[in-house]
Image (cartoon, rainbow, N blue to C red):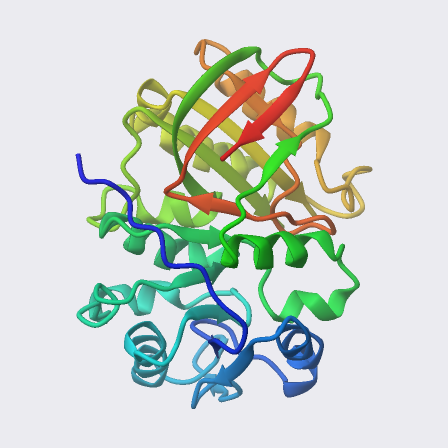
Amino acid sequence: MNSIIFPDSLKKGDRIAVISPAGSVEEAQLETGLNLIRAKGYEPVVGKHLYTKFSKGYSYAGTETERISDMNWALNDADISAVWTSRGGYGCQHLVGNLKLSEFKKKPKWYIGYSDNTVIQSYLLKNNFASIHGQTIKTSGFGVTPEGYDLTFDILKGKFPKYSIQNNLFNKSGTVEGELVGGNLALIYALLATKYSFEFKDKILFIEDIGEKFYALDRMIMSLELAGVFRKIKGLIVGGMTLMEDEKENMNYEESFDEFSYQLIAERISKYDFPVIFGFPNGHIYDNRPLIIGANISMTVGKKVEVKF
């Protein structure tokens, strides 16, 4: 088993590449986040195609070639110390077959993002590199909690988080340690049976999602079941499930932790005896706190619910 590589801590003045690997963004949407990077003492360096728009059934931040170019520049440029994505959306699957890590391996960098960025984070972990599943630059303009960004900057400085979480009625008690994998459920599902899929054996799996019909959520969970994922993992952490089903049909539509989604997941995994945390503050939600994909964590579920890195 290969050990996971963690990038070096950043120091003041270090340069952080900001790129758009998937959906397109407007300049105004990133202004708050870019200023935050500056305020923390770092220099944001924007990718050539950060604000490019290319329409092909979806508004991408450039053609596949353009987005691949920006990604490979950000990962491999020796003057860059971290890579922070502008947003997710859709498009990261276009990139993974063409990524290069030759210089990245000499100077590993923190890769920061969530949602569609789960694809890139799975790719990095397959190559034994940890990454940060946390706020993108765009979401800083939404009025989200500052803790998501503050804790991310802490990780960049080498200070890893410890979380105490409110108990949830769907939790399953237990204590376990293991390597954290996962991210957005739709992308975990999309990568199953590909060479870019996470490895699940003896891992702790994290999942979150947004905007899915309940049957689609069940289909993804069933696919993990049929693929044997729940027989392999040591623990499960469930984050945000929000804007699920239809606004007119779901009274919890705008809640961060949709109750019916949780009930559905809990019933599907009821036959397994691994500990489960529901209601972890990470995902497409107001309070999105960072997780480190590839890190060894301990999770305790009982009267106290804690996650320690």
Query: Would residue 172 appear left or right of 293 to someone viewing this image?
Result: right
Query: Would residue 107 appear left or right of 253 to someone viewing this image?
Result: left
Tell which of 65 and 9 is nearer to you.
Answer: 9
* Residue appearing at x 78%, y 46% in the figure: 254
304 over 257 or under it: above or below: above
Tell which of 22 and 127 is nearer to you.
Answer: 127
143 over 208 or under it: above or below: below
* Residue appearing at x 61%, y 25% in the figure: 306
Q: How many marks?
A: 0
Tell which of 4 and 158 is nearer to you.
Answer: 158
Residue 267: horizontal and vertical position, in percent? 55, 17
Residue 276: horizontal and vertical position, in percent? 54, 20
Tell which of 91 and 204 is nearer to you.
Answer: 204
Q: Point out the image quarter for the N terminus.
A: top left
Residue 14: horizontal and vertical position, in percent? 48, 76
Query: Would residue 46 appear left or right of 103 to someone viewing this image?
Result: right
Residue 210: horizontal and vertical position, in percent? 61, 49
Q: Look at the image and tell me whether residue 216 can be seen.
A: no
5 over 171 or under it: above or below: below
* Residue appearing at x 29%, y 83% in the figure: 65
Q: Look at the image and tell me whether residue 179 can be seen.
A: yes
